[in-house]
Image (spheres, rainbow, N blue to C red):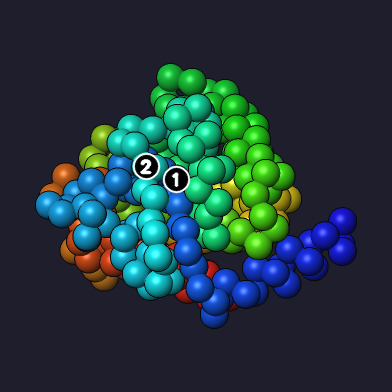
Amino acid sequence: MGTQFSSTRSSQMKHRSGKVENYVGIGASDTVGLGTSNPSVDGWVPRFASLISAQQTINLGRSGSTLDNALKQQLPKVFDKKPDVITIWLAVNDFNQQAYDHSILTSYTANLQLMLSELRTKLSENTRILVGNIPDLTKVSIYTSLGIPKLLLGIQVKRWNDAIKRIVKKNHCDLVDLHSHWKELNEHSEYISFDGFHPSVEGYQRLAQIFYQQYLK
């Protein structure tokens, strides 16, 4: 296991300075770029693609998608693309389902394990896989406006992020810790779009930078 891990990380180092031919984005409305008037330019996926100089970008994101949806609708389209880099930011829609499905975290972690293990098994060991966790939703006004206690919300987000971190590490992927950066919202309210939920143009630009910072590590 140690040898496989070292080999994977060693080969992944090549992509930090090497050419990226194919980049695939998996996700929901944030990956689509909802919240901007020109998602194909101002979304975080095209901005991240520009930062890594990807020759081809395949954005598979679908608004409203959950991880279970993505397993059926997005994951099967990945393999024939033979991507060098994959980003996955797909957790908030699942998280929001807790209101009527208290077992959703169990199914979410099982689905995340399935997705990452399939990607690791079927793609080249050189493929970089970056997975974003859940931002600090206590800083997002739409949640507090619904009357959700900040303490309870923060505890639930931590439970989910601990589970995401465990699965990401198990599959030798890169965790993009969006949660730790979301405190910036206190200083940059312009990061959230007019709908009070999705990132704005400025927010997506910052998201791309955060993913890129992890990519360079």
Question: What is the secondary structure assignment of the residue under circle 2?
Answer: loop
Say which mark, if any, is on residue 49. Answer: none
Q: Which of 113 and 125 is in front in this view?
A: 125
* The image quarter in which residue 93 lies: top left
The mark nearer the N terminus, 2 or 1, is: 1
Indicate the position of residue 57 as horizontal and vertical percent values.
38, 56
Does the rendering let one see residue 191? no
- Amino acid type indicated by mark 1: Ile
Packing grade of label 1 (10 A; few <14, some 14-19, many >=20) is many
Does the rendering let one see residue 103? yes
The residue singled out by tag 2 in the image is 61
* The image quarter in which residue 55 lies: bottom left
As drawn, 204 above or below 196: below
Q: Which of 74 and 102 is in front in this view?
A: 74
Say which mark, if any, is on residue 26. Answer: 1
Residue at (47%, 64%) from the top-left corner?
Answer: 21
Residue at (47%, 58%) from the top-left corner?
Answer: 22
Indicate the position of residue 113 as horizontal and vertical percent values.
66, 39
Packing grade of label 2 (10 A; few <14, some 14-19, many >=20) is many
